[in-house]
Amino acid sequence: MADSRDTVPSGTEESTAAGDQPGETTATPAPPGVAGVVSAVRSRRNLAVLVGLTGAVLVLIALGVFFGVRVLQTDTQEVRREMALQTARQFALDLTTINYQTAEQDVQQVINGSTEQFPAEFFGVNGPEFVAFVRQLQLESTGEVTSAGVERADVTSARVLVAVRATVRDSNTPEGTPFNYRWGVELVWTSDKWLVSKVELVL
């Protein structure tokens, strides 16, 4: 009579013994090419992020430089504007303050604060002739700036409106005669200062 016990196929025991325990699964390793692709993709992403951050930093630096230059230019214009105002005020005072005893120094002060063409154009004569005229009349003039304001100004030129009161005395009117002037003072920027190029009466 044949044995009723079930027989296990010969290949089954070996398969069970060689394999994992029942209920366990073994992960299938990724093909070598997949890992390389994943690594490459991650590297490219990191590179893209790095490039993006670098670009953002460069943009911020460029903006900082741009606005820094703008602020510097604005500060320079404000400084020159104030210098133009003060130069025009002083020049108007120099034009209306003169004494026959110090005429040469007084005229030289005007020459020093103006362009080369200004003295002859304003006085109608050269410096020495004007000094001789002042001494001949024993002229004395005392000026006072009553108001001044910048009409326009940039980094190379400016125009300032100046109101001046002057009292003029000479050998014929020792008691003095008052005068009121309102001038438009044109200035040009040289290497480090403003020079007056024109003075005209403003009605």
Image: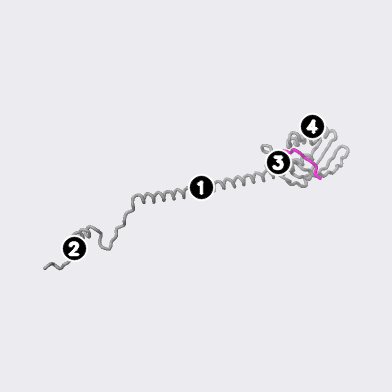
**Quick one: label 1, few (<14), some, or many (20+) residues within 10 Å?**
few
Circle nearer the N terminus (2, 1) = 2
- Inspect the image, locate mark 3, and give the three-letter code of the amino acid beneath it: Ser
- Looking at the rendered structure, the secondary structure element under dot 1 is helix
Residue tagged by mark 1?
55
Left or right of 80 on screen, residue 49: left
Pointer 1 and pointer 3: residues touching (CB < 8 Å)?
Answer: no
Pointer 3 and pointer 2: residues touching (CB < 8 Å)?
Answer: no
Q: Which residue does the image show at 38% across and 50% down from the upper left?
A: 37
Circle nearer the N terminus (4, 2) = 2
Mark 4–mark 2 Cα distance, whole angstroms, equals: 135 Å
Residue tagged by mark 2?
8
**Which mark identifies residue 157?**
3
Residues rendered magenta in the picture: 195-203
Circle nearer the N terminus (1, 3) = 1
Picture quarter with the N terminus = bottom left
Pointer 2 and pointer 1: residues touching (CB < 8 Å)?
Answer: no
Residue tagged by mark 4?
126
